[in-house]
């Protein structure tokens, strides 16, 4: 077998025209989960707290707010959008696209492609690569790619500490209009059974320690390493880096394995305060990084989705970021809006109380 | 099941899309094709900013059928920046107490599901306290 590590590069240069984040208001501290399930033992908690969606929120409503924020920065006519792709593992309908509702609400229908992506935590970046292809081939001027989740962990399971809600959206378009150019992408995918949810099941299953080395670390490091090799770049060429963040430790370790410093991942490392937003986790790190980046900054983003695979992106910030950044709420604005809840309220809000 | 009605109303509900009177410039919501101010035909589509303030409010503890899931909730008369008054739920209040004059902004949320858990999900406008940049 031959190996084809060639990077994914569009025929015409593309980039991010607008970006938007969304994090719901409510927060469940990890020590509250520990209080209920392990008698309050609080050492070694994976994060400080996680974001919980309100009773009237789901991936449709959250996507809509993130996409509206991206459009406020993009300042384009929604009728010029030719695709709306939304990645999530918690779409509210089993059959009926989230993307059609979002596209209708932003005024992008009817002359569009619309579809929902599913690839565990990398569904959002999968949508981004597709949008790069659609715009980069000249088939469309603009495409919307988003990744958001209202993730659920089984009560008492390790995932319950971190499974959170939030995400981000991007308007992808021609590089000359971009606030950040998407120079190249690269995806590394294998069949690895580290995490799954069978049909009709409410909660996912995972392979405990198996989720680390053969899944998260193998794919994240391979995607990151091959991206650097093929571009001929080194970690010090990048101002910032973002990795998928299922907890606080994993992204810090993969950054160190690839040779990135704690300072490079700092603005995008949000899992300690919002949890693992699954399809939104890497890309909300990107929106938070764009919120503080300067023109000329180079960014490496590597997502990871169980099943398993990683998408890596090489990104360069342009001058246009400065004129668009303040046109919508920033990622940290949403993080600062915070109402703490206890486990009882969480159980109600996440439908964990049997009513019939 | 009221699928046709929900489908017909989707744009005004998702994004506060009303009408603008080409004769007297009145902003109209909900859309009704005739200007309530001057009586002329008004069919020009107009997207409201979604910004407004609470004119009055009440809290519902005994919710009507289909809305029990989120009770107790607050319903407000919201005076939109462009003029019209709309009735809608307030959401994401957190620990904030609703009050008359509170600046609010429109967001799209799940209103309820039509029928039981097999029915369609109905999305529409609600209002939350206006968010500010940190």
Image (cartoon, grey):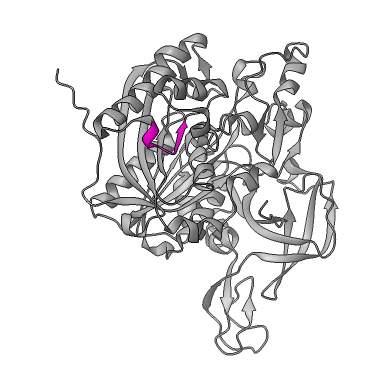
Left or right: B132 in relation to A75: right
A260 to the left or right of B62: left
Residue A117 seen anywhere in this rendered image of the structure: no
Where is residue A25 drawn, in percent x and y?
69, 42
Location of residue A59 by image quarter: top right
Quarter of the figure with the N terminus of chain A:
top left
Q: Residue at x 56, y 51 (%)?
A: A65
The residue sitting at the left extreme is A2
Is residue A96 or residue A72 the one in the foreground?
A72
Residue A337 position in % (x across, y down): 70, 45
The magenta span reads: A236-243
Q: Position of residue A14 (x, y in %)?
A: 31, 51
The C terminus of chain A lies in quadrant: top right
Q: Residue drawn at (58%, 45%), measured in percent from left and top?
A: A331
Q: What residue is rendered at 58% in x and 64% in y? A: B12
Which is nearer the eye, B116 or B9? B9
Q: Nearer the viewer, residue B66 or A47?
A: A47
Image-quadrant location for residue A103: bottom left
In the rendered view, tell whether residue A229 sits above or below residue B21. above
**Residue at 38% from the left image edge and 59% from the top image edge:** A110
Residue A67 visible from this viewpoint = yes
From this view, report whether residue A22 is shown above or below residue B49: above
Q: Is residue B78 above or below residue A17?
A: below
State the image coordinates of residue B98 (x, y, percent, origin top left).
83, 55
Q: Is residue A215 magenta?
A: no
Q: Quadrant of residue A179?
A: bottom left
């Amino acid at each position: 077998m031959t190996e084809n590590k060639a990077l994914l590069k569009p025929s015409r240069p593309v980039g991010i025209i607008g970006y938007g984040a969304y994090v719901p208001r409510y927060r469940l501290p990890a020590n509250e989960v520990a209080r209920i399930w392990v008698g309050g033992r609080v050492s070694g908690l994976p994060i400080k707290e996680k974001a919980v969606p309100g009773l009237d929120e789901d991936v449709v409503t959250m996507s809509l707010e993130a996409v509206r924020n991206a459009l406020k920065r993009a300042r384009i006519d929604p009728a010029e959008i030719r695709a709306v792709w939304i990645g999530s593992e918690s779409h509210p309908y089993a059959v009926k696209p989230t993307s059609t509702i979002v596209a209708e609400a932003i005024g992008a229908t009817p002359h569009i492609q619309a579809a929902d992506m599913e690839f565990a935590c990398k569904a959002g970046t999968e949508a981004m690569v597709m949008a790069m292809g659609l715009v980069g081939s000249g088939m469309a001027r603009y495409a919307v790619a988003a990744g958001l989740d209202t993730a659920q962990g089984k009560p008492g399971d390790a995932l319950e500490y971190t499974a959170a809600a939030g995400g981000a959206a991007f308007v992808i378009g021609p590089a000359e209009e971009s606030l950040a150019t998407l120079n190249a992408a690269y995806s590394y995918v294998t069949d690895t059974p580290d995490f799954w949810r069978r049909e009709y099941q409410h909660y996912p299953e995972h392979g405990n320690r198996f989720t680390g080395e053969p899944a998260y670390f193998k794919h994240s490091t391979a995607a990151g390493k091959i991206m650097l090799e093929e571009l001929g770049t080194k970690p010090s060429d990048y101002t910032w880096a973002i990795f998928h963040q299922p907890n606080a430790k994993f992204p810090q370790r993969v950054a160190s394995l690839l040779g990135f410093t704690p300072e490079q991942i700092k603005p995008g490392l949000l899992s300690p305060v919002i949890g693992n937003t699954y399809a939104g986790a890497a890309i909300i790190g990107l929106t938070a990084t764009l919120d503080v980046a300067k023109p000329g900054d180079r960014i490496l983003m590597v997502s990871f989705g169980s099943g398993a695979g990683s998408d890596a992106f090489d990104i360069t910030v342009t001058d246009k970021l400065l004129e668009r950044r303040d046109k919508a709420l920033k990622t940290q604005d949403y993080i600062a809006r915070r109402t703490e809840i206890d486990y009882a309220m969480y159980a109600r809000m996440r439908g964990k109380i049997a009513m019939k | 099941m009221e699928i046709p009605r929900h489908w017909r109303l989707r744009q005004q509900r998702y994004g506060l899309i009303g009408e603008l009177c080409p004769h007297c410039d009145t902003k109209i919501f909900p859309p009704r094709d005739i200007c309530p101010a001057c009586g002329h035909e008004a069919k020009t589509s107009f997207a409201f900013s979604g910004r407004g303030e609470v004119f009055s409010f009440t809290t519902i503890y005994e919710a009507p059928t289909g809305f029990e899931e989120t009770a107790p909730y607050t319903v407000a008369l919201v005076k939109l920046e462009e003029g019209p008054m709309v009735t809608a739920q307030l959401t994401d209040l957190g620990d904030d107490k609703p009050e008359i004059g509170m600046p609010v902004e429109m967001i799209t949320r799940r209103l309820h599901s039509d029928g039981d858990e097999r029915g369609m999900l109905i999305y529409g406008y609600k209002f939350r306290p206006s968010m500010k940049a940190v």
